[in-house]
Image: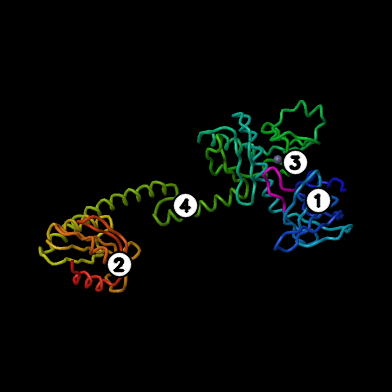
Amino acid sequence: MSTNTIKLYDEDSYLSDFSATVISCTAKQIDHQKPLYEVILSATAFFPEGGGQASDTGILNGIPVIDVQEKNEIIYHTLTAPLTEGEVINGSVNQTRRFDFMQQHTGEHILSGLVFKNFGYDNVGFHLGTDTVTVDFSGTFTEEDIRRIEELANDAVFHNIPVVAVYPDKVTLKSLNYRSKKELSGAIRIVTIKGVDTCACCAPHVKFTGEVGLIKVTSYQNYKGGTRLELQCGKRALTDYNKKEKNIQNISVTLSAKIYETDEAVKRLKDEKLSLEAKLTNLTIRLLNLKADSIPSGEEPYILFDYEIPDNQLRHFANLVKERRNGVVGIFIPSAKDSLIMETDEPLEYRYVMCAKAMDVRPMGAELNKSFLGRGGGSKEMVQGSITGRRTDIADFLKNFTF
Ligand SMILES: [Zn+2]
């Protein structure tokens, strides 16, 4: 039976290196994997996973600590190699990760406290991992609300307010009005940021709000009747700024637009694209009419392989040609993936339409599909589909086809 682990992070959230005695070390059986070891220490600076926050990582006597959990006031460290019971070890918490977590976590307190003060919404969910921080609230916001809260949160940072954690006695605790996610038992730790937030919490925080750095809400969306915010604080906010700045700079260079005018430049580009597409459609229709007009009338099958007819005009064009001919008309265009290939006699996938004024084209379509790995079908007057083959083979097949 182990006694409670002394939580060194409770007193000093900046503590990285510490010494402690190994109380116990047990092998954890995990199938098909290397064995892992669960170590209990007399004291630890490792903060366990909990309340939506991932655990600390680091080393104990040079052995990586890959997970930390707490059960009944005892902290369990998961290691990749064993330690000896009774030995005194040196531990070291990954302080870069810890400080990042402290920035995000304290930023969340500031934001949640201000949301509670200004809107009366509760924080109903929190996730803090290495990539994202999300905070869920029990109500909804407008864009204006979000920016206002963000501004107040950053004001709290600029005022560099102390973040104080204490264990009040029962009488004091009763007189306090504090946020709490669940019914708490045992000694209750109250974290206060004067004028901003009072909250029951056992996690490590920074000492002054100024250390949080910038607090930025990078997105928000309706979530389970409330709102889920995505948050970036401190160095994460800087990294995010840098990524977005790079993105904007690239757009600025590509469009030869000033940084603050890229938005307008992109809109212009989109409008130009739409206008060009409309012009292209008109020109294509004119081109197809001219093409159709130049086709002589006649009885024999008319077969055309064309690289200029767009997919969405294929049926229309085939109908134009059909009106000029008394026999079968077959129009073939390369399928989308091959449409940039210039005229070639290599096997290609073609989209086709076959039609005739007074003839059932279905048997011809069926035979064509059969001979050239095709699929498709249609009505008596028109069949369409796709096939794969050399254009000369396809043309020969159709010229020699007998109904
Ligand atoms: Zn906290």
* Residue wearing tag 3: 202
Judge whether 399 appears above or below 175 on screen. Answer: below
Residue 290 vs residue 1: left or right?
left
Residue type of the residue flagged with mark 4: Ile
Q: Residue at x 81, y 47 (%)?
A: 74
* Residue wearing tag 4: 248
Spot occupied by residue 332 in the image (x, y as percentages of width and height):
25, 64
How far apart are the alpha carbons under marks 4 and 2?
53 Å
Q: Is residue 322 visible?
A: no
Front residue of 270 and 140: 140
Q: Within 8 Å: ligand 1 and the Cβ of disc 1? A: no
Spot occupied by residue 211 in the image (x, y as percentages of width and height):
68, 45
Q: Which mark is residue 370?
A: 2
Mark 2 vs 1: CB contact within 8 A: no
How far apart are the alpha carbons under marks 3 and 2?
73 Å
> Which of label 4 and label 2 is nearer to you?
2
Q: Toward which corner of the image does residue 377 lie, by quadrant?
A: bottom left
* Residue wearing tag 1: 44
Residue 145 vs residue 211: left or right?
left
How far apart are the alpha carbons under marks 1 and 3?
14 Å
Front residue of 32 and 261: 32
How far apart are the alpha carbons under marks 2 and 1?
75 Å
Q: Which residues are magenta?
A: 48-56
SS at badge 2 = helix
> Which of label 3 and label 2 is nearer to you?
2
Mark 1 vs 4: CB contact within 8 A: no
Residue 146 belongs to magenta span:
no
How would you classify the magenta stretch by its main secondary structure? loop
How far apart are the alpha carbons under marks 3 and 4?
40 Å
Judge whether 278 appears above or below 126 on screen. Answer: below
